Image (cartoon, rainbow, N blue to C red):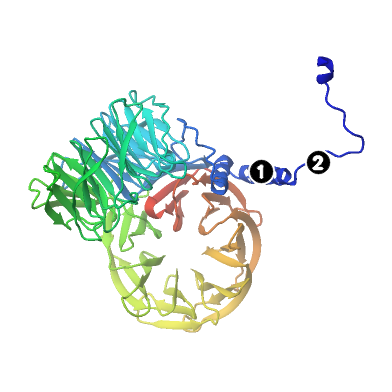
């Protein structure tokens, strides 16, 4: 009997084994996904992201402590990141720990009027929260998880541990031996940080009350034996922390019967202050002594003062909002008193208090310091511009210039070790759309939207002064602008829906060359102007004009573009174009320039979703789909991909790219300026 069972059942001759069509489709699709993912650098990250996007299943949900500190690279070094969104701050003694994009900055604030950045550490993702306990900073780092940084030597912060998975931590609170993490849809998570250099997981399963309910934990705060979790779906959830490793759910509270879509909270002595979870919610003050949170009182504030950060200290609530700072006396939580509201600092992202000074980071990239010794009359001590987004880049005379916010021009020293805050000039720009350089000067395409009437587009020349600053030389209106610029030594070209506007650098002369199908992308080199024009649903042309006489442009050549062009760069011998369809792969095409100006296609290479381009010497740097790529173009007939940086874990929305001496600069908007070094040179 046993011998018979050990043999497989005989098959019927001539009968085929039937495979489910659904199973066959599933196996085929899975194989294609795996093959496509591993065909690229860091394919595992792409496979994980794609699987999570399509199925909603997080294949990296298992908790892990081996998260890389920097993105995966091939033949690149991730050198530094400057500027960036100032999203978090924690102050202890004479230092402020600030999240600027993906970098943790350590700033000496002993002299509030002359701060100094003494140390920094580049991390993987966007920083959203910082807490400092003893000599360790706990940093919520987006896809980089929770990073634990030893800051005992402020000039050399050092990562000692990391924890996370595909769910990005939003906020963290540190208890006696545990870190409590607001982990978005994973709810509340707990790790043991008794020994910060070797944290461990605690088996705590957070869950909604009903199967049909979901969690989206945004922030956490602790007061004695009470843990408060602010949740976008479930509102305030209150936990008992008698056993720090196993919080017991007590009760919850919803503002107006709904969750906390946004806002901020601070707690002290069983009094919880929640500020502006929606534009009209005002400030709510809750008693959390009992088994369920109870609303004690509320304060009405203007609808546009929605809360972004709240701190409760010594019976006072300091509330940072989009439009200003509120100080409220909550010694009697049933009868709070609003002591002051000031617009000394606006657009507050986060704040902290040390002694009689309040330190706030703002959406404009400022660290603002306010004297609160008299809560009725806060006084501005100083403000320092140390961050901000980056949109357009120009690299001249060893200095990198980046537009920001978008009414500012920041300057950076290219050396990665430079720790000084950038110098900033503010111009009256409202919406910078393009930037180009002409010798030492910068030309800006600016767009403004008046309350009435059509948008106004301007071309402005900023002339560099002997002291390194810039001065507006002229500004002229451009009708029907397409937000694209090109500069030659003597002329500025502006793309428009009906042609090209041409300005001499002096600003004294202006010409217009009509093009029936309009000008979409421009490039200029020597006496030649290159214009990309969309002539139909799937037909795009690249025109070449001799611009020696700007009043009378002469067309000397044209070539077809594959569907659509995304970027165009020229040098002394070639024109480089990113072309292709809206979806799928695109191509970097190298076009040979003849002496007459005509173009001849020389070589191409496919790069996924490429849309930003810089060329220096024998390298083309292409920002593609979640990547920056280095392409060897020493042989234009056979360009080769030689290096990549995987940016899939970073919320890096590149808007411009520049390169010089093997250093690549990326304008990363909220991430500031990202700096890479090409190791293949």
Quarter-of-image position of residue 680: top right
Looking at the image, the residue that sits furthest to the right is 13
Q: Earlier in the sequence, mark 2 or mark 1?
A: 2
**Disc 2 designates what residue?**
18
The residue lying at 34 percent from left, 31 percent from top is 248
Q: Pinpoint residue 118: horizontal percent, then vertical percent.
A: 26, 39
Q: Name the front one of labels 2 and 1.
A: 2
Name the residue located 87 percent from the left edge and 28 percent from the top edge: 10
Alpha carbons under labels 2 and 1: distance apart? 20 Å
Q: Secondary structure at mark 1?
A: helix
Q: Position of residue 560 (x, y in %)?
A: 64, 71
Q: Position of residue 566 (x, y in %)?
A: 54, 64
Q: Is residue 337 left or right of residue 595?
A: left
Q: Give the SS element for disc 2.
A: loop
Q: Are marks 2 and 1 in contact (CB under 8 Å)?
A: no
For label 2, count other residues whose C-alpha is less than 10 Å away and answer few (under 14), some (14-19) or many (20+): few
The tally of labels here is 2
Q: Residues within 10 Å of mark 1 (few under 14, many from 20)?
A: few
Q: Looking at the picture, tell me which residue is in the foreground, 397 or 582.
A: 582
Question: Please, is residue 639 above or below residue 127 in the view?
Answer: below
Q: Would you name the residue on which mark 1 appears?
A: 30
Q: Name the image quarter holding residue 90.
A: top left
State which quarter of the image contains the N terminus.
top right
Whether residue 283 sits left or right of residue 560 in the image: it is left
In the image, is residue 91 above or below residue 619?
Answer: above
State whether residue 349 appears in this view.
no
Q: Position of residue 30 (x, y in %)?
A: 66, 43
Q: Which mark is residue 73?
A: none
Q: Nearer the viewer, residue 563 or 209?
A: 209
Residue shown at the point (84%, 27%) measured from the top left: 9
């Amino acid at each position: 009997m046993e011998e018979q069972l050990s043999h497989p059942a005989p098959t019927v001759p001539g009968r085929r084994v039937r495979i489910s069509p659904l199973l066959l489709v599933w196996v085929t699709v899975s194989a294609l996904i795996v093959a496509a993912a591993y065909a690229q650098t860091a394919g595992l990250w792409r496979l994980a992201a794609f699987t999570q996007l399509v199925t909603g299943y997080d294949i990296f949900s298992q908790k892990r402590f081996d998260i890389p500190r920097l993105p995966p690279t091939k033949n690149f070094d991730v050198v530094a990141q400057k500027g960036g969104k100032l999203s978090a701050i924690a102050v202890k003694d004479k230092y402020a720990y600030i999240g600027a994009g993906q970098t943790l900055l350590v700033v000496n604030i002993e002299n509030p009027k002359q701060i100094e950045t003494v140390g920094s550490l580049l991390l993987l993702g966007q920083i959203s929260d910082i807490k400092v306990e003893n000599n360790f900073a706990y940093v919520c780092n987006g896809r980089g998880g929770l990073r634990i940084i030893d800051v005992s030597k402020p000039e050399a912060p050092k990562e000692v541990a990391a924890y996370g998975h595909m769910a990005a931590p939003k906020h963290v609170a540190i208890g006696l031996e545990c870190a409590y993490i607001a982990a978005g849809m994973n709810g509340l998570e707990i790790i043991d940080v008794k020994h910060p250099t070797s944290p461990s997981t605690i088996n705590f399963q957070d869950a909604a009350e009903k199967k049909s309910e979901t969690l989206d934990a945004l922030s956490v705060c602790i007061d004695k034996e009470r843990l408060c979790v602010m949740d976008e779906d479930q509102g305030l959830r209150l936990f008992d922390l008698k056993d720090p490793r196993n919080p017991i759910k007590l009760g919850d509270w919803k503002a107006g019967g709904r969750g906390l879509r946004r806002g901020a909270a601070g707690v002290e002595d069983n009094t919880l202050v929640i500020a502006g979870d929606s534009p009209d919610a005002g400030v709510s003050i809750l008693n959390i002594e009992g088994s369920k949170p109870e609303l004690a009182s509320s304060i009405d504030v203007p609808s546009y003062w929605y809360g972004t950060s709240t701190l409760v200290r010594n019976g006072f609530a300091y509330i940072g909002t989009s439009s200003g700072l509120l100080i409220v006396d909550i010694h009697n939580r049933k009868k709070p008193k609003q002591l002051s509201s000031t617009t000394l600092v606006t657009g507050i992202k986060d704040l902290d208090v040390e002694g009689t000074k309040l330190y706030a980071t703002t959406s404009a990239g400022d660290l603002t310091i306010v004297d609160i010794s008299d809560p009725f009359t806060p006084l501005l001590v100083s403000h320092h511009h140390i961050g901000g987004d980056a949109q357009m880049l120009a690299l001249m005379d060893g200095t990198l210039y980046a537009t920001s916010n978008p009414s500012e021009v920041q300057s950076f020293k290219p050396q990665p070790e430079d720790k000084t805050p950038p110098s900033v000039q503010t111009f009256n720009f409202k919406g910078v759309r393009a930037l180009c350089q002409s010798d030492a000067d910068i030309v800006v395409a600016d767009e403004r939207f008046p309350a009435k009437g059509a948008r106004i587009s301007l071309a402005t020349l900023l002339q560099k002064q002997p002291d390194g600053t810039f001065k507006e030389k002229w500004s002229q209106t451009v009708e029907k602008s397409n937000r694209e610029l090109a500069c030659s030594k003597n002329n500025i070209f502006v793309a428009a829906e009906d042609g090209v506007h041409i300005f001499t650098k002096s600003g004294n002369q202006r010409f217009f060359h009509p093009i029936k199908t309009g000008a979409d992308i421009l490039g200029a080199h020597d006496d030649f102007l290159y214009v990309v024009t969309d002539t139909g649903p799937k037909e795009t042309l690249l025109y070449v004009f001799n611009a020696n006489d700007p009043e009378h442009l002469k067309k000397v050549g044209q070539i077809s573009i594959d569907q659509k062009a995304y970027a165009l760069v020229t040098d002394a011998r070639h024109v480089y174009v990113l072309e292709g369809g809206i979806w799928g792969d695109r191509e970097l095409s190298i076009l040979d320039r003849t002496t007459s100006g005509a173009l001849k296609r020389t070589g191409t290479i496919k790069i996924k979703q490429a849309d930003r381009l810089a060329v220096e010497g024998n390298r083309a740097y292409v920002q593609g789909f979640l990547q920056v790529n280095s392409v060897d173009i020493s042989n234009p007939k056979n360009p080769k991909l030689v290096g990549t940086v995987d940016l899939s874990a970073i919320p890096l929305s590149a808007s411009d790219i520049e390169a010089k001496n093997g250093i690549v600069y990326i304008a990363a908007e909220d991430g500031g300026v990202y700096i890479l070094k090409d190791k293949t040179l």
